[in-house]
């Protein structure tokens, strides 16, 4: 799991049938801001289970945990899901 | 899931029996910055994505669901071909051949 920021939304008409009805969000994972020179992580596409939107800070879960949050069973073509919208947190500065 | 661009095809004759008939693509994931992408991924493709297209790739059980069986020795598959993307910093766009943004 990780936290990140929703930076966009993705649309696809040619897709596996089980993706129908899911909002697909583009999430940019946070890095610890003090880390310099590290390679940027890739973007993650996650199905939305909590009505998150662009600009929200969210928590993403993978695999069975993510599908459990979506509540549509495990025979779906989803492997990452937004499971929470973050209100606040402490700890290192992320960005 | 990751989003990336189809950059190649892979063929293999000697392979696990469960992989027979599966189309294999090379996908280069998009990153957030302008640096080179991460390592290239090999993904099964039941949807018929073409070279240069933007696709979503899922892993594990989700990928095998798309491939039609959990009894496949395989971990990554194309689950969708992307039409368009909207970003917080402005507008909706499609992605061109080299990742450039084409406003819609």
Image (cartoon, rainbow, N blue to C red):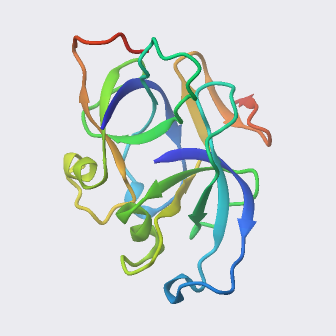
Quadrant where the C terminus of chain B sits is top right
Residue placed most toward the observer, B57 or A76: B57
Residue A46 place in picture, x, y as percent: 39, 41
Residue B57 place in picture, x, y as percent: 52, 54
Residue A83 place in picture, x, y as percent: 24, 36
Q: How many marks?
A: 0
Residue placed most toward the observer, B85 or B61: B61
Q: In this view, does A2 lie to the left or right of B8?
A: left
Residue sticking out furthest to the right: B97
For the point 38% across and 25% down, the residue is A4
Residue A81 place in picture, x, y as percent: 32, 43
Location of residue B96 (image quadrant): top right
Residue placed most toward the observer, B97 or B92: B97
Q: Is residue A56 left or right of residue A68?
A: right
For the point 59% across and 67% down, the residue is B45
Residue A69's place in the image compared with B85, above or below, is below
Residue B28's place in the image compared with A40, above or below, is below
Q: In this view, does B93 lie to the left or right of B3?
A: right
For the point 61% across and 21% down, the residue is B91
Residue A61's place in the image compared with A52, above or below, is below
Residue A23's place in the image compared with A33, above or below, is below
């Amino acid at each position: 799991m990780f936290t990140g920021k929703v930076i966009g939304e993705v649309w696809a008409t040619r897709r596996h049938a089980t993706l129908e009805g899911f909002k697909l969000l583009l999430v940019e994972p946070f890095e610890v801001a003090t880390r310099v020179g590290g390679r940027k992580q890739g973007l993650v596409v996650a199905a939305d289970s909590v009505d998150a939107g662009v600009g929200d800070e969210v928590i993403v879960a993978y695999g069975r945990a993510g599908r459990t949050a979506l509540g549509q069973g495990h025979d779906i073509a989803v492997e990452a899901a937004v499971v929470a919208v973050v209100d606040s947190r402490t700890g290192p500065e992320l960005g | 899931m990751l989003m990336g661009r189809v950059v190649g095809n892979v063929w293999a004759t000697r392979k696990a029996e469960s992989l027979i008939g599966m189309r294999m693509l090379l996908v280069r994931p998009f990153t957030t910055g302008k640096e080179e992408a991460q390592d290239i991924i090999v993904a099964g493709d039941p949807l018929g994505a073409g070279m240069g297209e933007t696709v979503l790739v899922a892993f594990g059980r989700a990928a095998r669901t798309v491939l039609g069986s959990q009894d496949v020795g395989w971990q990554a598959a194309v689950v969708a071909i992307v039409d368009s993307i909207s970003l917080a910093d402005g507008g909706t766009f499609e992605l061109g051949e080299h990742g450039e943004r084409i406003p819609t």
